[in-house]
Structures are given as C-alpha cells and as structure tokens.
Image: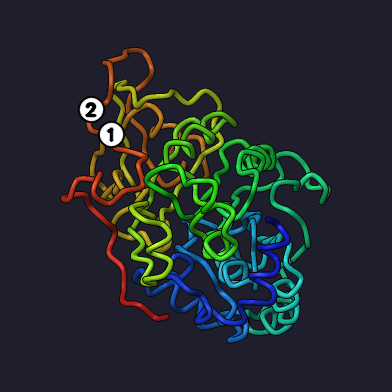
Amino acid sequence: MKDSVKAYYGQILRHSNDLQTNACCTDADVPDNLCRLLANIHEEVLARYYGCGLVHPQLLEGMRILDLGSGSGRDCYALAQMVGERGYVLGVDMTDEQLAVAQRHLEWHRERFGYARSNVEFRKGYIEALGELGLEDESFDIIVSNCVINLSPDKQAVLKEAHRLLKPGGELYFSDVYADRRVPAHLVADPVLYGECLSGALYWNDFLNLAKRVGFADPRLVEDRPLSIDNPEIESKIGQIGFYSATYRLFKLAALEPACEDYGQAVVYKGGIPGNEHAFALDSHHVIERGRMFPVCGNTYRMLNETRFRENFEFYGSWETHYGIFEGCGSSIPFSQSISADRSEPATGGSCC
C-alpha cells in the first residue's frame, strides 16, 4: 500500500486538479491572515498541494513544528512564516517527487521571507517510523498533518510516535478524512479510493479510541465538513458510507480525565494571540470571548493553563471541590449534524484559493 500511495502522489497526480474527488482539496473559507501567508509561497508548491483542511494552530512564534506527510511543502512554508526566524519547521514525507518540489524552493522562500537562514527542513521518511530519522523524544512543540494519516497502514504507530515526540503540553493539530462506519476490506484495497484519501479513512470512533490508547485522553474537534465526493463512479463504489473532513487538536497532558468534569473553574481570555483579537477558539465548542468570564471543565482548564496559551488567560478556581460532569461541554464526533446548530464559530475572511 505504501508503494501504491507513493506512485499515486508521485507519478499519477501532477497537480491538485488531477484529484478525482474533493476529499483532498480544501474548500473552506481561508482567513485573511492565512491568505497573506499563502501569497508568499511558490506557485509550484501550491500546485502540488493535496490537503483537506487548514492546519494553522494559534500562537506559533518561536515554536518547533513537525509536519507529518509534508508533500510539496505548502503547509511547512506557511508555518515557517508563523513561527518566525527563531522557529523551526521539519517536514517528513516518503514521496521523492513531492520532496523534490519542496526542497527545490528552500532558498526561494528564505529570500521571500527575508530570513538570514532557512528555518525549514525536509527529510524522507515514514510517519509510522519517525524513530528511524533519529528524532529525539519530546523535541517538538507542535506536530501537524494535513490529510495524510488516513494514508498510513498503521495509524496507531503514527499517533504513538507523535505522542513520543511532543513536549509535555504540546499538541498534535491535524486535519484528516473520517468515515461514519468501518470501511470494508475490498474498498481499502482499491488503490484509487485509497489514494483519494477515502478508503483509508478511520471510522471516527476507532480514531478516538486509538488516540486515547496512545495517551491523547481528550481529543478536541476544531472544525468539520461533509465530503460530497462529486464523482459518480466513485460514489457508486462507496455506497452509503459518509465521509467527513475534520480537524482535531490532541494535547499531550498527563492524566487528563476521560470525561469533562466540573470543578467550578473559569477562565478569562486576555487577548494577545494573533488572529484571535476578539475571541479564542480552542475547539468547536469553546469559543472564548476576550474579557468575558468563561466556565470550563477541568480538562479545558489544563489545556489552557499547562500549554503555550497560559500567559494569554486568567484562571479562576481550584481542584478542591468536584461538582460532577460538566454538562454540555461538547463532542469529539466529526459530524456536522451531531453538533448544535447554534455553536459559535470565529469569523473568517473569504476564500483566496
């Protein structure tokens, strides 16, 4: 299957227009600040982009970031601008043709960004076997991935490696394709369906269980959208299986609780996070307005208090009294129809792609 994926992304696909479905093609509105970053990326890099989401976590200045399945380097070069010259971005991919595109434009982007030295590096490797690249434990602040983990034949190994490489308080922030049921084996074996990021998609509940098994106790859904496929031949193959693009953030925090527990705690967002001037969106159920007291469960309290976001919040309450389950804290299910229609979302600009 690895050889099949290499051939699909290295030889069959030459441009994002060669994709046969909309699974690996971001069609969400792109925030204005990200549009400006993408305008600084070489056109060949943009042309070979096959992502399914917008991988742009907040507050990245000076961070060390690892991109799993970096492809032609689009997300790496966008993140390179967010982390600044003091930060570092490493992209790992297994496809020679994609790596060649990414590496060909290293100097072009360094000059475009005005950096004295490049803060981006690319290495060939498998995202299930990052130990073979000599990457040290707890050496990255953030790990990202964009529509790639579904292509891996060993997704648990990917998540386990990510957990190993993250610093305490770090996070895995990634977009991928999910299914509303387990995909049958005969569809998984179809090279086109697999290459189009469909038949390798995890059933959402299997993903949540895998994430918790390797140490990510409380996965948080950031955003999601249904995939319409838009290809009659492929739609006839997949039948009634529903596919969704979803972005999750998984924090590496010891002893997070399996449920959202209420300790009477609250936070106030002080501002100061670029792109989040009026509100901070931790996930799809936690959009925290600046200056407003916001009650939180114990896990959410820790996700803000024990991570890079700490200095941007005021914290209230303790752990002395437990009040039971925190009602209405949210869901990790990546289905638009499972989420309350009145949920708040941060405002975004129009599309620039």
| Residue in the foreground of this view, choosing between 285 and 239 | 239
In screen coordinates, is 135 left or right of 146? right
**Occupied quadrant, residue 263:** top left
Quarter placement of the C terminus? bottom left
Give how far across and how far down residue 206 sits, in percent.
48, 36
| Residue in the foreground of this view, choosing between 148 and 266 | 148
Circle on res. 327: 2
Residue at x 62%, y 67% (from the top left corner): 76
The kind of residue tagged 1 is: Cys
Quarter placement of the N terminus? bottom right
Give how far across and how far down residue 208 sits, in percent.
46, 36
Badge 2: how crowded within 10 Å, few (<14), some, or many (20+)?
few
In screen coordinates, is 36 left or right of 47? left
Residue at x 44%, y 65% (from the top left corner): 23
Secondary structure of the residue carrying numbered label 1: loop
Q: Residue furthest left?
A: 342
Labels 2 & 1 near each other (Cβ < 8 A)? yes
The kind of residue tagged 2 is: Glu
- As measured in the structure, the alpha-carbon distance from the residue carrying label 2 to the one carrying label 1 is 6 Å
Residue at x 35%, y 41% (from the top left corner): 333
Vertical relation: 241 (above or below) 210: below
Secondary structure of the residue carrying numbered label 2: loop
**Occupied quadrant, residue 346:** bottom left
Circle on res. 329: 1
Instruction: Kindly tell me whether residue 30 is visible in this rendering.
Output: no
Give how far across and how far down residue 143 sits, in percent.
60, 51
In screen coordinates, is 18 left or right of 342? right
